């Protein structure tokens, strides 16, 4: 029996294959930093702030996210994760995120090799998640219309329409999407949309004891997110892709990728 998913997948894969190169070109438009200089509008728009100077790499955010959103705990997939950056005195940079850091960083042994303190120039942690882009390439390439953006700026996945083709996963420049082994569909961070639309915080924010993460309307003068973005030096990841990400970082080092 041919299911709706099979029918859509067979009928649209060809079209999707033609669309990818066009979308890829869109990704490389020189619109870097546009999201940082655009005037705030009256339209409500969710945004996120990550203060990397406060992150200690405990991984409680990653663990809470998995539990809240029913992501298979032992699977090597996650909606949010924490990366450790170690810059050595010889100039090399080591980046790791074992199990998405859901169990935290407890020793200086990236990839099983001990790094001695005297070898290190600096070391820090960078939480990552979906950037909820203003111009999300994942939405542009979805052939089934399963990935869409809400009026308040959050990109979501309708699992009933996702055909599992993976185009959204390969076209996300932030590697924020993955294939959910239980639902057999694309998956990603939603800013805990089911919580924030009810006035709650995201699970990762509730789990963080250090105030690393904050969410709010980017155009609400009363929100902490607005106050930070409009008054402090913030940066976004990979602005050169032109996706206009809406996760803003404080203390982002130049070696972060």
Image (cartoon, rainbow, N blue to C red):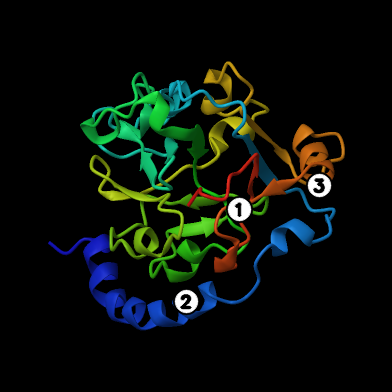
**Residue 198 found in image quarter:** top right
Mark 1 lies on residue: 150
- N-terminal-most mark, 1 or 2: 2
Position in image of residue 57 (x %, y %): 46, 25
Position in image of residue 188 (x %, y %): 42, 46
**SS category of the residue bearing label 1:** loop
Between 87 and 5, the one nearer to me in the picture: 87
- 57, above or below 76, in the image: above
Q: Are marks 2 and 3 in contact (CB under 8 Å)?
A: no
Residue 252 seen anywhere in this rendered image of the structure: yes
Would residue 226 be found to the left or right of residue 51 on screen? right
- 246, above or below 232, in the image: below
The residue shown at (43%, 51%) is 158
The residue shown at (43%, 33%) is 120
Pair 3/1: label in front: 3
Residue 23 badge: 2
Position in image of residue 67 (x %, y %): 38, 24
Residue 219 badge: 3
The residue shown at (43%, 49%) is 176
**SS category of the residue bearing label 3:** loop
**SS category of the residue bearing label 2:** helix
Position in image of residue 236 (x %, y %): 62, 52
State the CA–CA distance, disc 1 to disc 2. 20 Å
The residue shown at (43%, 37%) is 86
């Amino acid at each position: 029996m041919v299911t709706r998913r099979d029918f859509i997948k067979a009928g649209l894969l060809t079209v999707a294959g033609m669309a990818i190169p066009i979308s890829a070109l869109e990704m490389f438009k020189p619109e870097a930093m546009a999201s940082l200089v655009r005037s705030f509008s009256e339209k409500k728009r969710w945004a996120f702030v990550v203060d990397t100077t406060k992150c200690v790499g405990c991984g409680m955010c990653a663990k809470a996210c998995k539990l809240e959103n029913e992501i298979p705990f032992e699977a090597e997939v996650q909606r949010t994760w924490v990366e450790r950056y170690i810059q050595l005195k010889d100039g090399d940079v080591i980046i790791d995120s074992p199990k998405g850091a859901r169990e935290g960083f407890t020793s200086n042994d990236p990839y099983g090799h001990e790094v001695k303190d005297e070898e290190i120039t600096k070391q820090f942690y960078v939480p990552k998640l979906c950037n909820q882009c203003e111009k999300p390439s994942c939405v542009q390439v979805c052939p089934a219309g399963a990935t869409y953006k809400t009026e308040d700026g959050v990109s979501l996945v309708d699992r009933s329409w996702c055909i599992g083709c993976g185009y959204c996963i390969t076209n996300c420049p932030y590697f924020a999407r993955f294939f959910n082994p239980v639902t057999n569909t694309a998956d990603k961070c939603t800013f805990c949309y089911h919580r924030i639309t009810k006035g709650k915080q995201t699970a990762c924010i509730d789990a963080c004891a250090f105030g690393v993460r904050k969410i709010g309307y980017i155009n609400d003068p009363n929100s902490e997110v607005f106050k930070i973005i409009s008054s402090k030096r913030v940066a976004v990841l990979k602005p050169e892709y032109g996706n206009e990400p809406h996760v803003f970082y404080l203390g982002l080092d130049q070696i972060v990728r």
